[in-house]
Image (cartoon, grey):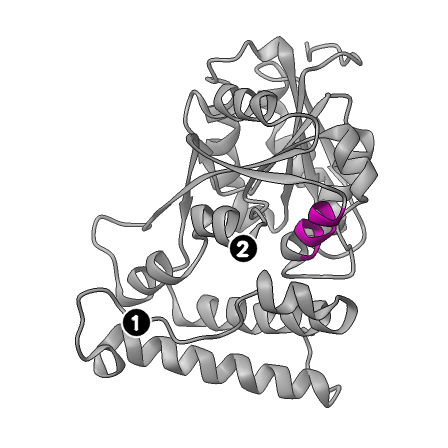
Amino acid sequence: MSRIIHSDYLASIIIPTHCYRQRSILLKRCLNALSHQTLNKECFEVFVVNNRAAEKDLWDKGLLEFKDQLNLRILHEVQKGSYAARNYGAALAHGKILAFLDSDCIPVPGWLKAGLEMLQKGGPRAVVGGRIKKVGRGEKLNLIEKHEKIFTLNQRKNVISGQFAATANLLVYRDFFVEVGPFNSGLLASGDVEWGYRAREKGGKFFYSAQACITHPVVNSISEVVKRYRRKAGGYYSVQKTTPKALQTEVYLGFRFLQLKKKKNSMIHPLGILHGMLNIIQRIEIVLCCLGKSQISG
């Protein structure tokens, strides 16, 4: 039998997902890791929010095994976008603390306990960004994976320099989340950046926790990375239209070319060439957004 849902959980873990065939194996690994947290499982609930309505039955049946292992609820959000899915889970959460994960993340056993301890130290307006350890999908990294490990999801930099935390590993008191307001559900990318700015405006303080660690696989194909960079460009364009320049210059660092460490000729290094190409793709996408011709402008 599934566990009884009650209203005094310490934490609610919210995980958006979609595309059962591609994501179900990864999500099951994530849920298995949550079932082995050092924090007592009776202290937290887990919401999996399916963002593809046509797959409702697949997710309901596919995750049935975890209902005996976790206080698990499977939700279905019809509005497209992971931020809409996160908002739906947050609206139904019972926990005093909201913890956001991506469906392909694997938290270490002490992840939730460490995140909660950092929140308690930071106070009621604290926002914790936990470490995101990027890993490849095989024993040897290909060029795309090497690029993604260098240039993406630097959570420590996000928190310390940018003052936002990626939703792949973010914890916040529910009361403060309600005060700041939900994620912008109209965005398909950069919603964590925009929410982080509003949290700062409300007096939020961001903290980094290396112990609240998850592993996160990086994309490994050119088609995946191009799609992600185009989506990032669309998100940047949308954020740029709706937020003040303080956010654009202080938080979102744009598409600057980053020098590769210990590479004197980084511009002609294969990783540098790839990064330059992706920068060009992003800039083209921004132009398409301005012209109203982008297909993924959010």
| Residue drawn 71% across the image and 56% down it | 81
Q: Where residue 135 sits: x, y (%)?
A: 33, 47
Q: Where residue 52 sits: x, y (%)?
A: 71, 51
| Residue drawn 79% across the image and 43% down it | 180
Residue 199 magenta-highlighted: yes
Q: From the viewer's perspective, is 271 left or right of 243?
A: left
Q: Where residue 282 sits: x, y (%)?
A: 53, 79
Give the magenta part as a residue range: 194-201
Q: Where residue 227 sits: x, y (%)?
A: 53, 70
Residue 52 in sight: no
Front residue of 222/157: it is 157
Please tell me whether mark 1 sits on a helix, a strand or a loop: loop
Q: Quadrant of the C terminus?
A: bottom right
Q: From the viewer's perspective, is 290 left or right of 216?
A: right
Please tell me whether mark 2 sits on a helix, a strand or a loop: helix
Q: Quadrant of the N terminus?
A: top right
Residue type, label 2: Gly
Q: Disc number at residue 162?
A: 2
Residue 14 in sight: yes
The correct choice, above or below, for 80 with respect to 235 in the image is: above
The correct choice, above or below, for 287 with respect to 272 in the image is: below
Front residue of 269/107: it is 269
| Residue drawn 49% across the image and 32% down it | 30
Q: From the viewer's perspective, is 15 left or right of 257?
A: right
Residue that numbered label 1 is attached to: 259
Q: From the viewer's perspective, is 222 left or right of 18?
A: left
The correct choice, above or below, for 237 with respect to 117 in the image is: below
The correct choice, above or below, for 123 with respect to 151 in the image is: above
